[in-house]
Image (cartoon, rainbow, N blue to C red):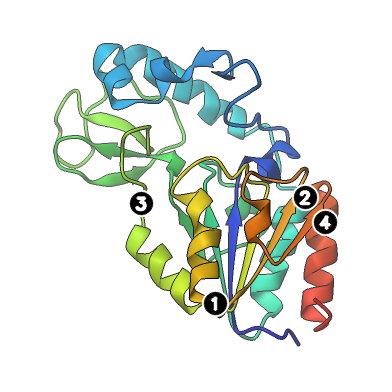
Amino acid sequence: MTNYQNIVVLTGAGISAESGLSTFRGDDGLWENHRLEDVATPEAFRRDPELVHRFYNMRRANLGTVRPNPAHKALARLEQEHDGEVLVITQNIDDLHERGGSRNILHMHGELLKVHCRSCAEVFDWSGDIDETVECPDCGVIPSLRPHIVWFGEMPFCMYEIDEALRSCDLFVSIGTSGNVYPAAGFVAQVSAMGRARSIELNLEPSEGVSLFNEARQGPASKLVPEFVERLLAGEA
């Protein structure tokens, strides 16, 4: 049995990288060979929607070629076996947590396998391609659909729910995050300021905010997370 009741886990690109998905931004400032300004801003979509659609169509297709890794599966095990609450807040737009078995997930940056209508605001599950000729299944407007992704300059999803979860948790775990993308990078400071939760970072290398955590461990997520979950469920972490 764990020593905690409400566990909040924040995950970033590092946990999905071990499944073969590229991290958000490479050392060269590109995202899968594209400038962020060309594919990840509202201005880019207004300027060249077809380019943005092609980029996300490619990412959507690539998602089918990767599988959840032991870190995703370990978090699902924690949710299933813990007798309290476990919430995964992910910055990732892939579905690897879901396919790994987790069910209590908040996608703060959106989901690659969803689109929403700019006209009626309805959200739809979507696994195929889209372009500006596709009509909204609900209101029929053309063009209307866009990736259900939070781009730079847009407000992340689920911030009220996230704030409530951070206020009530007694263990905060950050996995595979760089610590330089806000607001997620500020979660550990928020938890620390309240002084009631332990915070742990599991990362390949120390994040920019590592000094704010009570404890930090370095290594691959696929190794660290299963080991941590095993100890947590045994009441040893």
Using the image, tell me which numbered label, if any, was put on residue 224: 4
Looking at the rendered structure, the kind of residue marked 3 is: Phe
Looking at the rendered structure, the kind of residue marked 4 is: Leu
Determine the secondary structure under disc 1. Answer: loop
Front one among 147 and 196: 196
Residue at image mark 1: 195
Q: Position of residue 140 (x, y in %)?
A: 15, 33
Q: Position of residue 19 (x, y in %)?
A: 73, 39
Picture quadrant of residue 64: top right
Marker count (numbered): 4
Residue at image mark 2: 221
Is 45 situated left or right of 106 in this image? left
User: Is the C-beta separation of discs 4 and 2 under 8 Å?
Assistant: yes
Labels 4 and 3: the sequence-earlier one: 3
Front one among 144 and 212: 212
C-alpha separation, residue under disc 2 versus residue under disc 3: 25 Å
Where is 183 relative to 42, above or below?
below
Q: In which quadrant is the C terminus drawn?
A: bottom right
C-alpha separation, residue under disc 1 versus residue under disc 3: 25 Å
C-alpha separation, residue under disc 4 versus residue under disc 3: 28 Å
